[in-house]
Image (tube, coloured by chain):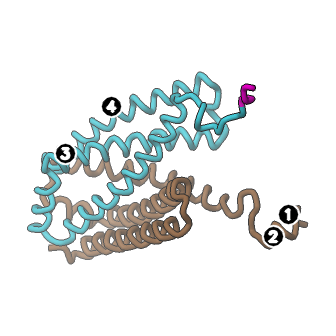
Amino acid sequence: MSLRSPLRRVTGHGSAKGGVAHWYAQRVSAVALVLLGLWLVVSLATLGGASHARVVQWLSSPIASALAVLLVLTAAYHALLGLQVVVEDYVADKGTRVGVLLAIKFALAVAAVIGVLAVLRIAFGVAA
Amino acid sequence: MAQRARPLSPFLHYRWQYTNTLSILHRITGVLLSLGYLVLVYWLAAVAAGAERYRAAMDTLSSPLAQLVLLGAAFSFCYHLLNGVRHLFFDLGHGFERGTARASGWAVAIGALLLGVILWFAVRAGLGGAA
């Protein structure tokens, strides 16, 4: 049994609506990014004056390329969730808000696809 | 007759203090890291595009302006990481006591400044002086 009144159900204005899933996804991706982020910066710091060949050698190992793909995807998702909250908090006009959110989604989707394709090209030895 | 004092909206009379400073910094560094994400993708694409394009990208990234941006990104990374972990503990119900929250806040701020500079130097060194 729902405690919400029929009017609330029709208008969709509950106290939190669907916020819990967003909130939880932000935390789950945050925990993943703690590990992936630390892996990235430690890897970059220990490349030892990296030439292009050295970077390719590092990124084309199965573990590094898998972690890099995970990082690219998780970071885009976490950024999307975070930027969405910021935009929803500070952009009052509904039309502008929807437009900005769409632009952010498209930009992050394009960036994530470019990032994943780049890692895959390196992993499969397409990068010269 | 003097008008009775009416309550003000919270943002008009809340004192500026460390809690909201740390909170807004978390948002600002998060937005900056979203831009840093684009730099990471640019770097990955440059690696995939071959040695020549990679060298050109590294030249771009070693300009003084780019280095300043990357220093900001390094600080943002450390701040957002440390304060993010602090908030994960809050989410689990720990660290709300006034003294603890204040101490962890200071640890985050000072730690991020120190680690940010160290990270910037370390990545510069790791990538051949050109971060």
* Dot label at residue B114: 4
Neighbour tally class for label 1: few under 14, some 14-19, many 20 plus, Cα within 10 Å = few
Secondary structure mostly taken by the magenta-highlighted segment of the chain: loop
Residue A14, percent across and down? 76, 61
* The colour assigned to chain A within the rendered structure: brown
Which residue is at the front of the view, B15 or A61? B15
Q: Which residue is mark 1?
A: A4
Hey, which residue is sitting farthest front in the picture?
B1
Secondary structure under the numbered disc 3 in the rendered image:
helix
**Stretch in magenta:** B1-5
**In the visual, does B113 lie left or right of A105?**
left
Q: Which residue is mark 2?
A: A9
Which residue is at the front of the view, B24 or B90? B24
User: Label 3 sits on what residue type?
Assistant: Arg
Which residue is at the front of the view, B92 or A76? A76
Q: Which residue is mark 3?
A: B124
Neighbour tally class for label 3: few under 14, some 14-19, many 20 plus, Cα within 10 Å = many
Chain that bears disc 3? B
Chain that bears disc 4? B
In the image, residue B65 above or below residue B10: below
